[in-house]
Image (spheres, rainbow, N blue to C red):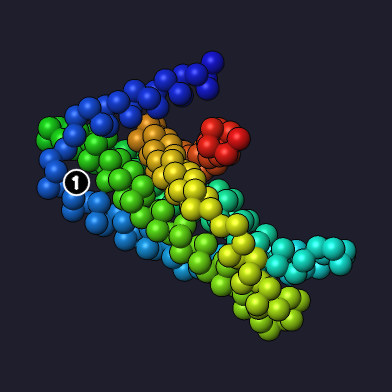
């Protein structure tokens, strides 16, 4: 029953968030700040993880090709598909849920326990809209660019490891990357990324906004926000894949 209660409260908060928008001028300023904080601030970790994952996928695929009947370009094909369809979308979203989601829940939670949200309400500001909408919009805008960047870095990492390790020729790797490429794979990845961006920001914001207590409860809310958003990301990943690819 607690789960159903949380789901109901979440949708009530989202309805309040979008039904009574704050002034557009205030939202625009916040969106610019949040895009830098939530998106560009994660470029470093995304770059490092994507580069090494592309390299590891290339090495693992090459080392597991035992049959001479399997062409070398399979390595590049596997690296491309793995990065585009799953790693640069779902895995990066899970990483961001931990990094970004915990920050959102902690930030809003501290504003709740220090009565800053109550002060906004007294001034006639829709605190839910003012605090949550810019984060959601910023993430939905910037996260697809982060996903594309992750794809590029991951495939580049695979190319570089092929170049320097010699597990497969670079010509064969590039042939595999180009083989049977479908633009719909990119559209599918970007749709998933936008949905995940909404989840990453809205669920931790919900837990932070409804904190009751002090700093200890803020930490608990932050943990809940990360865990619950990660679970919902996995469920959404299955549903979107079932709808778009099957």
- State the residue at coordinates (81%, 63%): 70
Question: Toward the viewer: 96 or 234?
Answer: 234
- State the residue at coordinates (40%, 41%): 198
Secondary structure beneath dot 1 equals helix
Q: Which residue is mark 1?
A: 27
Question: Toward the viewer: 168 or 205?
Answer: 168
Question: Toward the viewer: 103 or 65?
Answer: 65
Q: Quadrant of residue 154?
A: bottom right
Q: Is residue 36 above or below residue 216?
A: below
- State the residue at coordinates (24%, 56%): 32
- State the residue at coordinates (43%, 41%): 195
Q: Position of residue 211 (x, y in %)?
A: 39, 34
Q: Quadrant of residue 136?
A: top left
Q: Position of residue 73 (x, y in %)?
A: 70, 67
Q: Is residue 178 above or below residue 6?
A: below
Question: Toward the viewer: 18 or 124?
Answer: 18
Q: Position of residue 243 (x, y in %)?
A: 54, 32
Res 229 visible: yes
Number of labelled discs? 1
Q: Residue furthest right?
A: 67
Q: Residue furthest top?
A: 1
Q: Position of residue 89 (x, y in %)?
A: 52, 51
Drawn side of residue 204 relative to residue 72, left or right: left
Drawn side of residue 22 relative to residue 78, left or right: left
Task: Pick the quarter of the image with the N terminus.
Answer: top right
Q: Quadrant of residue 113?
A: top left
Drawn side of residue 17 relative to residue 161, left or right: left
Res 158 visible: no
Alpha-carbon neighbours of circle 1 within 10 Å: few (<14), some, or many (≥20)? many
Task: Pick the quarter of the image with the C terminus.
Answer: top right
């Amino acid at each position: 029953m607690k789960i159903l209660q949380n789901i109901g409260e979440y949708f009530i908060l989202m309805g309040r968030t979008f039904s009574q928008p704050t002034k557009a001028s205030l939202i625009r300023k916040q969106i610019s700040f949040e895009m830098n904080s939530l998106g560009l601030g994660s470029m470093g970790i995304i770059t490092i993880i994507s580069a090494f994952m592309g390299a590891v996928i290339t090495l693992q695929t090459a080392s597991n090709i035992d049959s001479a009947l399997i062409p070398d370009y399979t390595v590049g094909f596997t690296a491309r598909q793995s990065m585009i369809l799953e790693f640069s979308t779902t895995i990066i979203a899970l990483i961001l849920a931990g990094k970004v989601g915990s920050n959102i829940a902690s930030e809003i939670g501290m504003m709740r326990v220090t009565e800053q949200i109550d002060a906004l309400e007294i001034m006639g500001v829709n605190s839910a809209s003012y605090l949550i909408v810019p984060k959601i919009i910023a993430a939905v805008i910037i996260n697809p660019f982060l996903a594309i960047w992750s794809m590029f870095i991951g495939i580049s990492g695979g190319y570089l490891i092929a170049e320097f390790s010699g597990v497969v020729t670079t010509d064969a790797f590039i042939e595999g990357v180009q083989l049977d490429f479908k633009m719909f794979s990119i559209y599918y990845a970007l749709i998933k990324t936008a949905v995940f961006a909404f989840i990453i920001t809205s669920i931790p914001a919900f837990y932070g906004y409804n904190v009751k207590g002090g700093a200890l409860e803020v930490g608990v809310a932050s943990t809940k926000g990360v865990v619950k958003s990660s679970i919902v990301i996995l469920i959404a990943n299955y549903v979107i894949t079932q709808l778009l690819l099957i």
